[in-house]
């Protein structure tokens, strides 16, 4: 029962710790290291800041958590697609273009730096490049990463109003492909291998209109299809939490959202970030690891309880520590002095300590006579008082300068040890004069 209680306490602490970490991941950018541009992420890549700006400006914000072929919003709405993690299927692309052709507006911000990833529909081409190829666009790398760049409108447009500088960390710029072959060659250069690539046939586009450029190329491209349009941004990080407040990034974002006036609603596409209806390894939503963590905790708990309840043999007491007798200590002490040829001093020292101990046991003063000491000891212990008196009197006759034979010295110390063993359990102070 004791082990079971301990295990339950440990399990409760681990559950509480797991929930606490899950909460931190969902609330703090420091603990959320998943690199995507979902509108529910607070890390540097997420777009939660942009969504909150829209909400504070009383824009009707909604989450699109179903595929595009189930998107039934009004054409007066705006769909925001930021760096999708998975490429859409052909029927989704067709449904999206049909919605745009009917008057819908899409804000597409891509991350063209990533080329290769798993894509069930288009082999190993990333979703960003699939969308660009479908729109007849390619990217060009202009050099190293840059920070704040000066921008200028390619054509007069409300989108470029009050936008002078942008924080752009990607070297990618947008360009229009002249043919399907150019799109395929561009993808082939990006992939850099001989794997067969599916042909991505671009959709029929009515007009390409660069809206904003810098010295290296186009940053914002408008693609007009029917009565609707798709505004493509070359770097999704421009709208990310870490850059939205830099330079004129937020101004550009709001200009694009209000390009046709107040939208009926702004939909943030979370389906392609794995928010609903998708399961994939790259996405790590807040708390998604909780079940796996609990399984690991359960396994550890089973191991702990099985080990704690299993007894390997019967309990046995500890082996007592070996103790030396008092006679051995006295014999060893005498042997040291004998080797130094100081037998008299040896016996005198042992006799002094022996007499001091007797006075402590009996309570008599140090000046007590041998007869009185022996009589008092005999009253408390089972010793022969006459033999003890004779020993004490003989010890008083030995001087430190006296040279004793080995036999006599050992005989005296042996007799002292005999009496010491009788009274060794008496309470004697640790120090003596």
Image: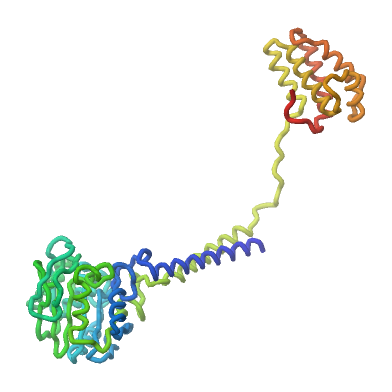
- The residue sitting at 8% across, 76% down in the picture is 154
Rendered residue at 72%/39% (across/down): 320
Question: On screen, 105 above or below 249?
Answer: below
Q: Quadrant of the C terminus?
A: top right
Residue 413 in the image, given as x and y percentages of width and height:
79, 18
* Pick the front one: 254 or 280: 254
Q: Which of 380 and 257 is in front in this view?
A: 257
Which is nearer the eye, 89 or 128? 128
Quadrant assignment for the N terminus: bottom right
On screen, residue 234 above or below 329: below
430, above or below 61, in the image: above
Spot occupied by residue 252 in the image (x, y as percentages of width and height)? 19, 75
Between 152 and 324, the residue placed more toward the observer is: 152
Could you tell whether 195 is left or right of 180 in the image? right
Q: Where is residue 174 in the image (x, y as percent from the top left)?
A: 13, 72
Residue at x-position 27% and y-position 87%: 265
Specify the quadrant of the image occupied by residue 29.
Answer: bottom left
Q: Is residue 7 above or below residue 73?
A: above
Taking the image as drawn, is residue 59 in sight?
yes
Residue located 53% across and 66% down the image: 298
x and y, in percent, of residue 216 in the image: 10, 67
């Amino acid at each position: 029962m004791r082990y079971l209680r301990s295990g339950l306490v440990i399990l409760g602490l681990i559950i509480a710790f797991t929930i606490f970490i899950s909460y931190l991941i969902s609330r703090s950018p420091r603990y959320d290291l998943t690199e995507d541009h979902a509108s529910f992420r607070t890390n540097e890549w997420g777009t939660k800041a942009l969504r909150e700006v829209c909400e504070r400006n009383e824009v009707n914000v909604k989450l699109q958590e179903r595929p595009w072929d189930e998107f039934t919003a009004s054409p007066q709405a705006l769909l925001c697609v930021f760096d999708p993690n998975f490429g859409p299927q052909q029927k989704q692309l067709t449904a999206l273009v049909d919605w745009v052709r009917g008057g819908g507006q899409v804000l597409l911000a891509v991350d063209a730096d990533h080329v290769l990833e798993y894509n069930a529909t288009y082999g190993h081409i990333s979703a960003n490049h699939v969308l660009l190829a479908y729109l007849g666009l390619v990217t060009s790398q202009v050099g190293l990463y840059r920070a704040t760049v000066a921008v200028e409108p390619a054509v007069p447009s409300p989108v470029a109003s009050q936008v002078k500088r942008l924080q752009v960390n990607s070297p990618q710029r947008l360009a229009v492909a002249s043919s399907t072959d150019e799109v395929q060659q561009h993808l082939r250069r990006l992939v850099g291998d001989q794997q067969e690539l599916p042909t991505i046939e671009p959709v029929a586009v009515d007009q390409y209109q660069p809206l904003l450029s810098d010295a290296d190329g186009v940053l914002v491209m408008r693609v007009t299809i029917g009565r609707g349009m798709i505004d493509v941004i070359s770097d999704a990080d421009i709208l990310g939490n870490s850059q939205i407040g830099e330079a004129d990034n937020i101004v550009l974002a709001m200009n694009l959202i209000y390009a046709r006036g107040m939208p009926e609603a702004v939909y943030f596409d979370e389906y392609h970030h794995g928010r609903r209806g998708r399961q994939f390894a790259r996405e790590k939503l807040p708390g998604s690891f909780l079940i796996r963590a609990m399984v690991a905790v359960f396994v550890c708990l089973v191991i702990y309880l099985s080990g704690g309840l299993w007894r390997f043999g019967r309990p046995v007491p500890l082996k007592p520590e070996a103790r030396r007798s008092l006679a051995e200590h006295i014999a060893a002490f005498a042997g040291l002095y004998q080797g130094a040829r100081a037998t008299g001093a040896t016996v005198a020292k042992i006799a002094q300590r022996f007499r001091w101990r007797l006075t402590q046991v009996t309570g008599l003063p140090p000046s007590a006579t041998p007869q009185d000491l022996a009589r008092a000891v005999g009253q408390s212990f089972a010793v022969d008082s006459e033999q003890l008196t004779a020993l004490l009197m003989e010890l008083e006759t030995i001087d430190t300068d006296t040279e004793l034979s080995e036999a006599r010295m050992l005989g005296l110390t042996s007799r002292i040890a005999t009496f010491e063993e009788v009274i060794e359990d008496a309470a004697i102070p640790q120090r003596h004069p």
